[in-house]
Image: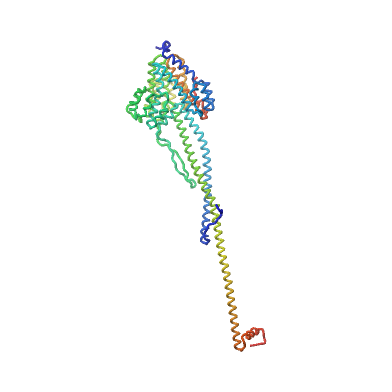
């Protein structure tokens, strides 16, 4: 990434300034919301993690006890009880359904199991071992419960992990890239606008000065003209030269004795 | 003629009785079981077993060893012993030995029939059958679509034919639950075996009728307890009880109407031999009932060896081996699953 805080390449006008300001406001608000979402997801994440640890431990013990129940059943009902049960089954009676739950905006999958249909194996081991076979069945049903729960917990864990990473990425992007960029753009636009204003001002001032000098010059020209007119009149009246009249006028102002 | 077997038994049965008694002395003792219970891994178990009769069967197994492999190899030994005895036997001992395996045959037939019903592969099913219960035409069971065909094509040639007449008329497989079929067949088998032993007479009849009655009663109790709360009706339940044994007929009447364990206990406590078994259980608990039954069975089987010149020793030997294999399976599973504390829950010491 070249230049961490570049600015956008747009024309620095007042309208674009307004647009970029609005975007900055949006970015700030989005940043705050996403941060909240990330925090909520992290809380959920920690809870799920705790549950996973405890479920895994219980699964260890339950699987152990269910394998032992199987051994007891095999002891009493004979080694073949496994084959007898397996051959007698043609569709599963315990099935798993999945549905999605919405947690802080993230869709998490959840699994739950349900029993479908009666099992025909109620009478297995009728002559010997029936009790142990049913106990084994119960133990394995419990094991399936725990396994299904563990499966939903683990998938939620992975999905949440993903969601948290994405959200955090967005938060960081907003904080470190988008907002500085927008702020830089705003300051650039403002700078450009200020400069334009200064230029305008300078131009104005210059023109004003120009105009003032123009006016003074014109005033001076008009005065000169008026003076010359007077001199001409005097020279005409007195029959002297313009220069002499001119001198007369100019000195006359100093000589008090001469009265005309 | 009871009492004069000593004169004539050894002519035909002497060699095999000696063989069976030799095998019996090779069964694992309490010391062996104690050693096995101390093992930490399955390799330790394999090492301990290599010093027993199971040695040659296990020594070629690569580690990591699996519990099912151990059980398989031990069963293999049992099958080999049995086959050796069978081919040396004359009538009627040969028929007697075959009778012992009909139970496994029934299990295999039921397994293949259910598997075929649900369209499983035949080869896979054959691998899952118990080796003692195999017979030649077993693979053709897979082609049958309903019971009529099954009977006509396959079963009529097997020794199980007479047992099927009780439960099959023109019903399709689906109508009757597989377990009910299995238990009906087993009931017919037990009754047939009982009659055969009675025909043999003498010490065999006496000892075998004791053992078979115990088996029948035990099945009746188990069926009652396991069918509490299921869809099995009382009449169906009654149909599955055998028509001999200590509980016949009054015990069966009472068992048929039992609705929970305590009622069963109440019924059984009227019969002294079973009173002691039920005294071991506390109220409302039935998990240990199976183990209690196994212990009682082992006691009776060991008593069968006390007498000579009868066929009961063969039956007792086969059953004791099966119990031993069960013990080995239990110990290996406990060791493999790290549940050493439960090892002594279910091991039944034979001596």
The image shows a total of numbered marks equal to 0
* Outermost left residue: B170
Q: Quadrant of the C terminus of chain A?
A: bottom right
Q: Position of residue B318 (x, y in %)?
A: 44, 20
Q: Position of residue A64 (x, y in %)?
A: 50, 32
Residue A115 placement: quadrant: top left
Give the vertical position of B188 relative to A29 (above or below): above
**Nearest the eye: B32 or B291:** B32
Q: Position of residue A76 (x, y in %)?
A: 45, 26
Task: Determine whether, in the image, residue B291 is placed left or right of residue B112.
Answer: right
Task: Determine whether, in the image, residue A69 is placed left or right of residue B238.
Answer: right
At x 49%, y 44%, the residue is A159
Give the vertical position of A188 relative to B245 (above or below): below
Give the vertical position of A41 relative to B300 (above or below): below
Would residue B238 be visible to someone looking at this image?
no
Residue B244 placement: quadrant: top left
Would residue A197 be visible to someone looking at this image?
yes
Q: In the rendered view, how is the structure colored? A: rainbow
Q: Position of residue A25 (x, y in %)?
A: 52, 56
**Nearest the eye: A1 or A152:** A1
Task: Determine whether, in the image, residue B276 is placed left or right of residue B142.
Answer: right
**Nearest the eye: B314 or A243:** A243
């Amino acid at each position: 990434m070249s230049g961490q805080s570049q600015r956008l390449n747009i024309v620095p006008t007042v309208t674009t300034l307004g647009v970029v300001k609005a975007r900055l406001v949006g970015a700030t608000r989005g940043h705050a919301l996403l941060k909240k979402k990330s925090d909520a997801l992290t809380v959920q994440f920690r809870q799920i993690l705790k549950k996973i640890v405890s479920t895994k431990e219980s699964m260890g013990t339950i699987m152990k006890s269910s394998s032992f129940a199987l051994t007891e059943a095999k002891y009493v009902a004979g080694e073949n009880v496994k084959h007898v049960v397996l051959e007698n089954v043609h569709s599963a009676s315990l099935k798993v359904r999945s549905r999605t739950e919405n947690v802080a905006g993230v869709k998490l999958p959840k699994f739950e199991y349900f029993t479908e249909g009666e099992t025909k194996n109620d009478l297995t081991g009728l002559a010997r071992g029936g009790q142990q076979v049913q106990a084994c069945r119960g133990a394995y049903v419990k094991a399936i419960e725990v396994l299904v729960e563990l499966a939903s917990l683990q998938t939620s864990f992975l999905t949440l992990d993903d969601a948290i990473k994405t959200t955090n990425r967005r938060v960081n992007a907003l904080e470190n890239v988008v907002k500085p960029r927008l702020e830089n753009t705003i300051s650039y636009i403002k700078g450009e606008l200020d400069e334009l204003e200064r230029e305008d001002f300078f131009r104005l001032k210059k023109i004003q000065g120009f105009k003032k000098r123009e006016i003074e010059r014109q005033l001076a020209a008009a005065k000169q003209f008026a003076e010359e007119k007077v001199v001409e009149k005097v020279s005409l009246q007195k029959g002297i030269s313009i220069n002499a009249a001119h001198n007369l006028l100019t000195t006359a102002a100093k000589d008090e004795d001469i009265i005309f | 003629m009871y009492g004069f077997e000593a004169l004539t038994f050894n002519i035909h049965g002497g060699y095999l009785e000696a063989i069976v008694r030799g095998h019996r002395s090779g069964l694992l003792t309490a010391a062996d079981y104690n050693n096995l219970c101390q093992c930490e891994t399955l390799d330790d178990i394999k090492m301990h077993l290599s010093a027993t009769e199971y040695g040659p069967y296990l020594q070629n197994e690569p580690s990591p060893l699996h519990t099912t492999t151990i059980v398989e190899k031990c069963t293999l030994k049992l099958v080999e012993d049995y086959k050796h005895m069978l081919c040396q036997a004359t009538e009627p001992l040969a028929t007697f030995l075959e009778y012992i395996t009909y139970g496994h045959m029934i299990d295999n037939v039921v397994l293949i029939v259910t598997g075929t019903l649900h369209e499983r592969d035949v080869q896979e099913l054959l691998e899952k059958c118990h080796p003692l219960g195999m017979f030649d035409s077993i693979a053709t069971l897979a082609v049958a679509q309903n019971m009529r065909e099954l009977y006509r094509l396959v079963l009529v040639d097997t020794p199980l034919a007479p047992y099927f007449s009780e439960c099959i008329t023109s019903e399709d497989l689906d109508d009757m639950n597989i377990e009910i079929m299995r238990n009906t067949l087993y009931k017919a088998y037990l009754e047939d075996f009982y009659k055969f032993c009675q025909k043999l007479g003498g010490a065999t009849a006496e000892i075998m009728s004791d053992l078979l009655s115990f088996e029948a009663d035990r099945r009746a109790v188990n069926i009652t307890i396991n069918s509490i709360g299921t869809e099995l009706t009382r009449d169906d339940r009654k149909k599955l009880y055998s028509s001999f044994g200590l509980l016949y007929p009054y015990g069966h009447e009472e068992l048929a109407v039992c609705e929970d364990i305590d009622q069963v206990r109440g019924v059984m406590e009227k019969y002294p031999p079973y009173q002691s078994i039920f005294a071991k259980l506390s109220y409302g608990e039935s998990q240990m009932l199976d183990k209690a039954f196994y212990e009682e069975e082992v006691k009776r089987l060991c008593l069968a060896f006390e007498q000579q010149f009868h066929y009961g020793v063969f039956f007792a030997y086969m059953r004791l081996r099966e119990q031993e294999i069960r013990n080995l399976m239990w110990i290996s599973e406990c060791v493999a699953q790290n549940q050493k504390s439960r090892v002594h829950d279910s091991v039944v010491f034979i001596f």
